[in-house]
Every structure is written in structure tokens, then in C-alpha cells.
Image (spheres, rainbow, N blue to C red):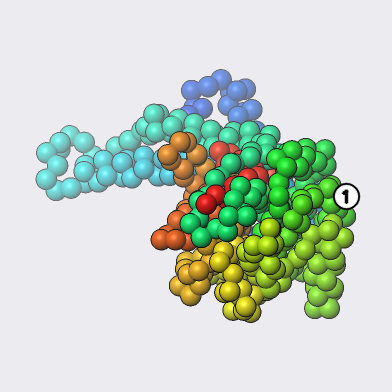
Amino acid sequence: MFIKSSILFIVVIALLLDVYIFQIVKSLTAGAADGARCITHSAYWIISGLALVCACLLPFIPFHKLPNGIRTYVLAIIIGLLLAKIIAALFFLVDDVRRGITWLMYKLPFNTNNTVNADEVSISRSTFLSWLGIGLGGSLFGTLLYGFSNKYAYTIKHVPLRFPNLPIAFKGLKVIHISDIHAGSFTNKEAVNKGVQMILDTNPDIILFTGDLVNDRATEMDDYIEVFSRLKAPMGVYSTLGNHDYGDYTSWETEEAKKNNLAQLKAVHQKMGWRLLLNEHVVLEKNNQHIALIGIENWGAKAFSKYGKLNVAYKRAETYPFKILMSHDPSHWDAEVRKHYTDIDLTLAGHTHGMQFGVELPGFKWSPVEYLYKQWAGLYEEHNQKLYVNRGFGFIGYPGRVGIMPEITCIELRC
């Protein structure tokens, strides 16, 4: 009921935006030939109308039963159009405020231009602001469409990390960190296979996956078990669960069906040869020296589930000189890890995807997600502790990437 009400609210907002923006479209095409004006007006309402109809149908469509490509692209186009219109409307609103102030100036008592009747004043729109709004809104939509081609553009980030307390036997250890596969969004098995091969080509010593294997359902992995089963490393492949893995964001016939789905997903990890860490730790050994690898279930400081129990996983790990924590949500680092577990040297997380949209330049990075998460992509350091947030191997919602590419992190531990 909540979802249907939310979508209805969005549809109403989108319709009001359409009516408002159409007034500007009419203004800009007033001087065009009748045929061109008719085509422009018709095209506007056909595209907007289709988007509104699709949005209205969303609550009634069993999206998990539709092909991946259909559901992701439909959602992306609807959201992309809405965002583009919001951007354009902001510029139109600025222009309307300017027009309103100008009109009000004619109404004020100290207006000395007595020859002008304020009720008869016609204050035209700013052609510049109108075209600027349409240009920026259209550019955003075009950029989102272009981003469709980047969803499998895997990038390897090489990250050397130094720790004074790292046992000498683990010097040079090559750790591959991946996160947020979201198999339910994939539509190109060959492209995913190439990403897996990129991981294998780095010759990792150990592979760590920090959650969100699927969007909702274990069956999303049916076509990809053989692909990710290829991931092997001398010291093993370890994994944890993310917030999407519990099936909290879809409808289930019964609570038992939801529990069975989680059990099936855990079995998928085992079938692929991945060691799933559920609020526990394992000891990694090399040349008779040891470090602890801790893995917890999802724990989010914001409105996400808190299944993780670090106190349970950490127990008896304190005796080891170096510790790595796998925790899906980076907000866990500030909320609990740094406060109460100051001897956890390296925390690996994912979850944010860098919002799959942003800008990354040498020395500068930005994404809208930074207004929600203090740590959202890359390396963060506080005192003697480090956090690395992977930008995600897969994607969800928006089937693309703009500026924030899908990531394979290659961490080399150094003394």
C-alpha cells in the first residue's frame, strides 16, 4: 500500500511538471510553422504520456518475473525523464520569479511610470533561461542514456596499503575486493565473464566479496553460478551478505518463502566455493604467522537492517596482530568499528555504488551520494584505521554508470 501511494504521489508530481513545462515549450515554439509546432507538441505528450502510464502500472506489474533488461531500462527512462524535467523546471521557476517581481514593481505605489497599467503588462519569458533549462535537462537525460554503455566497463583500482603491524609473512599479499554484484540486473553474461577474467588475471592471493550478490531473489544467480564459480585464489574466496541479500525489498507469498530464499542464497555461496562469513572470523596463516579475517552480516547506521553482530564475530580475534573486517555498509565504520574496535586495521565495504553517477578527477570526486554517506567511494583513514569502499561490480535501478565506473579493487598489503 505504501509503495502504491508513493508511486501515485510521484505520478501526480510528474503530471504537474509536464503541464508546467509544456507552457514553456508552447512559448518557445510560438513562432514555428504550424506543422513543426504540432509535431513538437505531440512528441512531448506522447513521450511524457508513455512514461506516466508505465509509472502508473509499476505497482501492478510483477517486475521480478520480467526480463532484466525490460525492468531496468523502463525504470531508468522514467526516473531519467523525471530528473531532467526537474532540472529544467528549476530554471523556468527562476524565470517566473523574475517575471513576478517585475510585474509587482509596476503595482507598487511608488512606481513613477503612471502610463503603464500593471494589469495590462505582459512580461515575456527569458528565452535564454528557457533554453538553458531545456538544454541542461536534455543533457542530463542524454548523459544517463550514454551511461547505459558503461555498466560493464570494469575498472581495476590498484591500492597499496601500508600497516606497521602487518606480519612480515603477509607483506605483498594481493587482495581482490569486489562488492555489490546484483546478479538480477545483469543482461550480458559474456560481459560479466570478462569482468571475472580481469579479476583472475591479477593473480590474487585472496578474494573478498562484501555483499549484495542479488537484488532480491536467489534465483537471480541461476545463470551466473558457473561464471562466478571461476573465481579462485590460493588463500580462498570469502564473502558476506548485504542488505539486498535478505529479500527485504520484494513481496513474498509467505514468511517461510522468504526464509527459504535466504537459505538458497547461502547455498549458492557454498556451491561457488565461497566461504560465507556470518558474524564470525577465520584465521589466515602464512609461514606460521597469522591474521584474522572477520565477516559480519549487514549492519547499516541508517534505515537499513542490522543483522550484523560484530561483538560475536570479533570474539577471540583480538589475539591476532592484524585484522581485516568485511562489512557491507560503510556507515558501520564510524558508527561502531572506530568507536569500539580500534584494533581493526582495515575495513572493506561497498553498498553505495558511488550512486553510479558522479565525477572523478585526480584529487577530486563528487557524487550526490556524498550527501547521504560520509564515506562513499575509495580510501578513508582515521588514525591507525583504514576503510575502503568499493564502487560496486554490478548495478541496480539505473542500468548504467556515469563517471563512477564498476570497480575491481586490487589491494596490496605492505609493511
When asked about the image quadrant of residue 101, the answer is top left
Q: With respect to residue 84, does 185 lie above or below? A: below
Write the residue at 75% across / 65% down: 276
Q: Secondary structure at mark 1?
A: helix
> Horizontal and vertical percent for residue 94?
36, 43
Question: Which residue is at the front of the view, 102 or 365?
Answer: 365
Task: Note whether residue 17 is visible.
Answer: no
Question: Which residue is at the front of the view, 367 or 387?
Answer: 387
Total marks shown come to: 1
Question: How crowded is the residue under tag 1: few (<14 C-alpha within 10 Å), some, or many (20+)?
Answer: few
Q: Which residue is mark 1?
A: 226
Write the residue at 71% across / 50% down: 205
When asked about the image quadrant of residue 264, the answer is bottom right
> Horizontal and vertical percent for residue 273?
83, 58
Question: Which residue is at the front of the view, 160 or 36?
Answer: 160
Q: With respect to residue 287, does 191 lie above or below? A: above
Amino acid type of the residue tagged 1 in the rendering: Glu
Left or right, residue 378 beside residue 59: left
Question: Which residue is at the front of the view, 182 or 257?
Answer: 182
Name, please, the residue furthest toward the top: 33
Write the residue at 79% across / 70% down: 262
Task: Note whether residue 183 is visible.
Answer: yes
Left or right, residue 151 beside residue 37: right
Q: Which quadrant, please, contains the N terminus?
A: bottom right
> Horizontal and vertical percent for residue 303?
56, 70
> Horizontal and vertical percent for residue 291?
62, 64
